[in-house]
Image (tube, grey):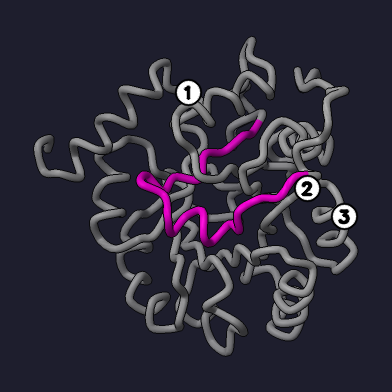
Amino acid sequence: MNERSETTTATPAHSQARTSFVDALLTARRPLVMEVKLRDPHGNDLLGERTVTDLVTRYEQAGAPCLSVVTGRWFGGTTRLLRDVTAATTLPVLQKDFLTRPAQLEAAHAMGASAVLLTAALLPATSLTRLITHALGLGLTPFVEITDERELDALPHPQDCVIAVNNKDIRTRERDPGDLRRSLHLLPAVRAAGCRAPVSASAITDPHTAARLLDAGYAGLLVGTALMRTTDIDTWLTTLDTARTGVAA
């Protein structure tokens, strides 16, 4: 598959200092993690005629505080995609993949990532604890994805993690429509665990939904397919802002 990403000869952006992923979310006027991924859960192309750099530049122009890059093969990703994005931006970048080993975290750090996805449902508690600790030791933000309150039990260093509620089901490769009630139900428990930066992720299809989740108390949202498919990102974001003030339904 042609990823339409490109190698740059400029000084890699990941060699420059980045704001921490958590701080970028907590200080953002519009705390959206804008995602780069090549395919949707059904295998449909999302990049179109754009290059990766085109998309990253557009997200920067739209005021993204941080980015997410899906390197998982379900979505057509590779680690090359992560390298291309971190070379094109100084924003904090999350690597989204099924990371299960310390060596993968070290590789993510070497490629310029600022945060790494750790999926609680896939990891034994001891492994999750070890990986969170290892990520923090590398200067990476653990982006811990949960779908159940039990996955918060004994989670170490919650104040230094992003805890993200996934509104979709990874058992179906996220091909389900998602259930936003999960985010609304779990937010109090995530806050009670000590997390400063709770995030709602996946199934956020329109700006009105995004507004409701931010108004409910989420510190950030991860939005991928909806932003990649919109033909007018500025209108999408303006509608989000208006919906948050109660002007729009």
Against 85, residue 117 (above or below) is below
First in sequence: mark 1 vs mark 2: 2
Q: Residues within 10 Å of mark 3 (few under 14, many from 20)?
A: few
Quarter of the rendering occupied by the C terminus:
top left
Name of the residue lying farthest toward the bottom? 154
Image quadrant containing the N terminus: top right
- Spatial CA span between label 3 and label 1: 30 Å
The answer to whether the residue labelled 3 contacts the one labelled 1, judged by CB atoms less than 8 Å apart, is no
Asked if 2 appears above or below 138 in the picture, the reply is above
First in sequence: mark 3 vs mark 1: 3
Looking at the picture, does residue 17 appear above or below residue 227?
below
**Range of magenta residues:** 16-37
Q: Which of 51 and 40 is in front in this view?
A: 51
Residue beneath label 2, please?
A: 112
Query: Residue 44 location, x and y as percent?
Result: 60, 24
- The residue that mark 1 highlights is 229
Q: Disc 3 on helix, strand or loop? A: helix
| Coordinates of residue 39 in the picture (x, y in percent) | 64, 29
Q: Residue 69 location, x and y as percent? A: 66, 41
Q: Position of 106 compared to 162: left or right?
A: right
Q: What residue type is labelled 2?
A: Gly
Q: How packed is label 2: few (under 14 Cα within 10 Å), some, or many (20 or more)? A: many
**Residue highlighted by disc 3:** 107
Q: Nearer the viewer, mark 2 or mark 3?
A: 2
Residue depicted at x 53% and y 61%: 22
Where disc 1 sits, the SS reads: helix
